Amino acid sequence: MSVEVSVLSKPEDNTRGPRMMQMSGVRSLSNEDFFKASLTNAYAQLPDDRPTLIVLRSFLTFGDEGYETERAVLGSQALVIPTIGVPYQRWNRNGFFTEADRGRVSAVGVLKPRWDGISSSFSLDIYHNDAARIPLDWTLLTRQSIRHLVRVDDEHMEWKGGRD
């Protein structure tokens, strides 16, 4: 197996796009919206003939680690309480993978810095696309710093590999 890494288009100076707040580096646009916009721009550049992985580099996290990424990629979760029957959880179709036909992307990864007080390193969380035309085999990318969110059955997804 070989992995080809390409840096897709450089960020443009878009004066009407997300603005940085002076001194803080915090975007005025929510991280979820920023992730979705970044993914949409990268998606337009993907090839059709091989597995593809879009990797976002995130140095800002707010609240629950990965929650905004999960919402941006997979969609938000809802608890459905029917008048008759048992309540159940479902994914709303408002994530990057589900809003439109996004079959060219095999997975989306988020590269994050890690600091243990002594040294720094990076971790990579990879969210696999169930509707990918050419899926990415998660067992091909295994390191302690890489974990994969994959579907295990019709109702469940699970983190595989990497850190526990």
Image (cartoon, rainbow, N blue to C red):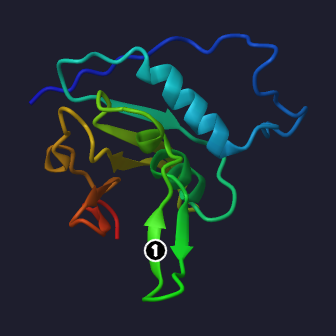
Q: Is residue 84 visible in the rendered structure shown here?
A: yes
Q: Residue at x 50, y 56 (%)?
A: 92
Question: Is 119 rendered above or below residue 133?
Answer: below
Position of 137 with respect to 105 (left or right) is: left
Question: In the image shown, does 90 or 69 lie closer to the viewer?
Answer: 90
Q: Residue at x 43, y 43 (%)?
A: 98
Describe the element under mark 1 as helix, strand or loop: strand
Q: Identify residue type, mark 1.
A: Gln
Q: Residue at x 55, y 68 (%)?
A: 78
The percent position of residue 146, horizontal first and vertical second, equals 32, 51
Question: In the image shown, does 155 or 34 lie closer to the viewer?
Answer: 155
Q: Residue 160 appears in which quarter of the rendering?
A: bottom left
Position of 163 with respect to 160 (left or right) is: right
The mark total stands at 1
Position of 117 with respect to 7 (left or right) is: right
Q: Residue 90 appears in which quarter of the rendering?
A: bottom left
Q: Residue furthest front?
A: 84
Residue under numbered circle 1:
89
Q: Residue at x 36, y 32 (%)?
A: 102
Question: Is 81 rendered above or below residue 28?
Answer: below
Quadrant where the image shows the C terminus = bottom left
Q: Is residue 119 visible in the rendered structure shown here?
A: no
The percent position of residue 47, horizontal first and vertical second, equals 28, 16
